[in-house]
Image: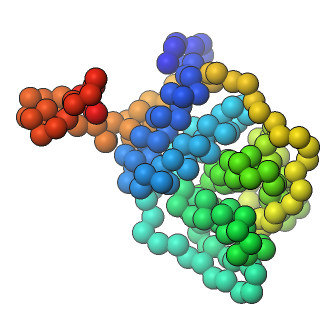
Amino acid sequence: MAPGVGGLVICSINEVGAMLRKAALGSGFPIGLADVISSAGVWLCVRDLDGIGAALEALDAGYPTGVESQRIGATLTVSNARIGRSGVSLIELLLAGEVERVIVENPDSIMLLAGVAGVGATNSGVAFALIFDDASIIIDSQPLEASELPISERLEIEITEPRGQRFQPRRGAVTVDVDRWETICELAARIYVPATDESRLSGAGAGLTDND
């Protein structure tokens, strides 16, 4: 991390990914979902979108205990959707052909959902249509404008064709709002162990840092 200007800091992509993963773990998410949140946040950041803010929206209330869902035929509806927990499952169900359409109601972070879909699209070579009441957007590996994502209490997701050849952004660093970065660091710090002799006797600090 390096100082920026105007309340911003400059972070490497690797640093962003690592800290988002730790923040998700510190918020109570299991390792697999922490990896998903981290990957989605990075996918957004390298496309000049607010991946940090999207992750914080999902981490704000901690890890949810359940998922409200109903399946009718080939359509799955998820109510009060917590994207940090259910987002990747929805995308994987579509990719596997288990469902043809997903209806998402009251999502906590449409931006993070776009990131999760973006990672799935980039890795699989397909695309996802996010269909809102009066608009629809295509999520694939291509750049995405934040203004394309409306605030909505309901959207549908379907698989569709990508818009062109696979796009690979060339970004080594991104600028991040310093307040949001500090919040991420505070969440990440929840998984750290105290740097004490007692903690070391219990096995901490076996590597190069006290938090190994």
- In this view, 178 is above or below 199: above
Residue at 63%, 82% in the rendered image: 70
Residue 41 horizontal/vertical position (percent): 60, 41
Residue 185 horizontal/vertical position (percent): 41, 33
Residue at 77%, 33% in the rendered image: 168
142 relative position to 7: left or right: right
Nearest the camera: 196 or 56? 196
Residue 149 visible in this rendered orientation of the protein: no
183 relative position to 164: left or right: left
Residue 36 horizontal/vertical position (percent): 55, 50
Report the number of numbered marks. 0
Q: Quadrant of the C terminus?
A: top left
How did the renderer colour the structure? rainbow
Residue at 82%, 54% in the rendered image: 127
Nearest the camera: 66 or 80? 66
Residue at 48%, 54% in the rendered image: 32
Residue 197 visible in this rendered orientation of the protein: yes
Nearest the camera: 200 or 206? 206
- In this view, 182 is above or below 121: above
Residue 54 horizontal/vertical position (percent): 60, 45
Q: Residue furthest bottom?
A: 73
- In this view, 21 is above or below 69: above
- In this view, 197 is above or below 78: above
